[in-house]
Image: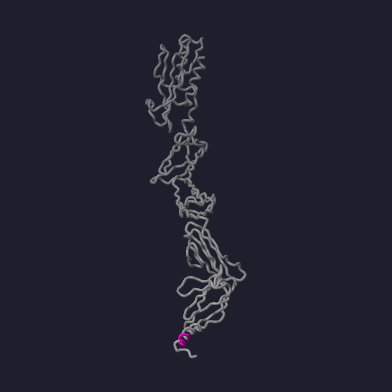
Amino acid sequence: MKLSAFLIFFLFTQLIPLTLQKKIIVHVTPADATISIRQTGSEELRQVGIGTATIVIPRNTPVAVVLQKAGYADLKIVYSTLLGEKIPKEDFFTLKDRQVRLKVWPADATIICNGEELEKAMSNVIIKEGEQVNVEVKKPGFITVKKSYKNEPGAEPPPIFDEIKLKDRVIHVVASPSDSKILVDNKLIGTGSGDIIIPLDGCAVVKIVREGYSELEQTFCNKEGGAELALKESFTLQDRLVMVKTAPDDASISIKGQVVATGSFIVKVPKGECVEVTAVKEGALPVSKSYCNQDNAPPLPAMDTIKLAIDVTFNSSSPADFVNINNIVEINPATKDDDAWKIMSQIVMNYFDVIEVTDKATGYLRTAWTVKSFPNNTIRTRVIVKVADSSTLKYVVKLCSESSGKSGSKGNDDSLFSEWDRVLETYKNLVSDIQTRLK
């Protein structure tokens, strides 16, 4: 039976493509690696085997074979009958390059692999056979984390999946003046500027110190869900400190009328203000000094000594509880009135040259003021005597002792003087002399 020409042509056109198809057996190590194919123009992978698979290569259609296993870099082979390429019956492959699926946090951190930047958040790190890959994960405000993966004989295989989380924070601190010291938890980390590291769930106490300034202190905490930390913090020391010492070293130090210390004291002078310090010691002249922390004021010293000069007035006088009060002098009954007045008058004139008022009839005597000027003070002194009781004769003797607090004061200007609880050595025995002689 003869086939028609049409049937012969039909069978020929159908069988020719079949004879042009190729088959290849692909083997892969490790044996549990998957074998998948991807047709040209498609992104979809279709698994065709594990370890071994037979791949059909259609006429004039390239086939991409992808060999995969977790922890290894994908291996892609393309088979094609185009251009008369020869396709072996079997092909053997070994997955050698390793792959780490790397996830980082924060998600916007930069991932650098051997100097090249990878995709953020999640990236594949490829480690070629016999090589080492160095990975850096960094973000401003965080301590950079570095990690190495090796694909070398004898080395521990890289993990299939790895996660790097930036945890420890870093803050760049700048201090002014530039020679200020920066301490973290009381340990010096730098002068003028430095980086402070705050571990996760930890805190750091930062102090900025410099001689002559009031220190600044701030605590920074790195807590999940806590306040966001700045990349940079600036500190400026403004309030000044002056260590004030006195000479002699037992003088009292007062600020705003309040005694704050004896001998030495650290005076704080806030920015834009002035503080007046007064040093006082018995027997010395008080000294007041103003310290100003203002833009146009002279620079403040870190340490200053207030020297007190000797008070000549003090050394020329004695404390007296009998001055400026009425002292009762009882007269010996055996002494006649005229004799008593005469004795009293003579004693007064031994101390005072000028008697301003004297009246025996009324029993009143008052001397003129005697004035003595010192480098720091003016002292005026006088005595007033009155008869206190005529029935049983008694005198009231008042020794007046007053000071102006300034040198060269006029003795007749009452507005300049006030009572002084001391008496010049010249007059300290006046009252006792009267009492002794008339007793």
Residue 81 lies, in percent from the top left, at 49, 82
Task: Using the rendered view, name the quadrant where residue 368 is placed.
Answer: top left
Q: Residue furthest right?
A: 154
Magenta stretch holds residue 111: no
- Pick the residue in front: 121 or 386: 121
In the displayed structure, 180 sits above or below 47; it is above
* Residue at image coords 53%, 77%: 55
Residue 431 lies, in percent from the top left, at 49, 20
- Pick the residue in front: 178 or 362: 178
In the displayed structure, 218 sits above or below 4; it is above
In the displayed structure, 401 sits above or below 185; it is above
Main secondary structure type of the part rendered in magenta? helix
User: How many badges with numbers are in the image?
Assistant: 0
Q: Residue furthest front?
A: 1
- Pick the residue in front: 335 or 417: 417
Residue 234 lies, in percent from the top left, at 45, 52
Write the start and end of the magenta stretch as one range: 7-11
- Pick the residue in front: 134 or 71: 71
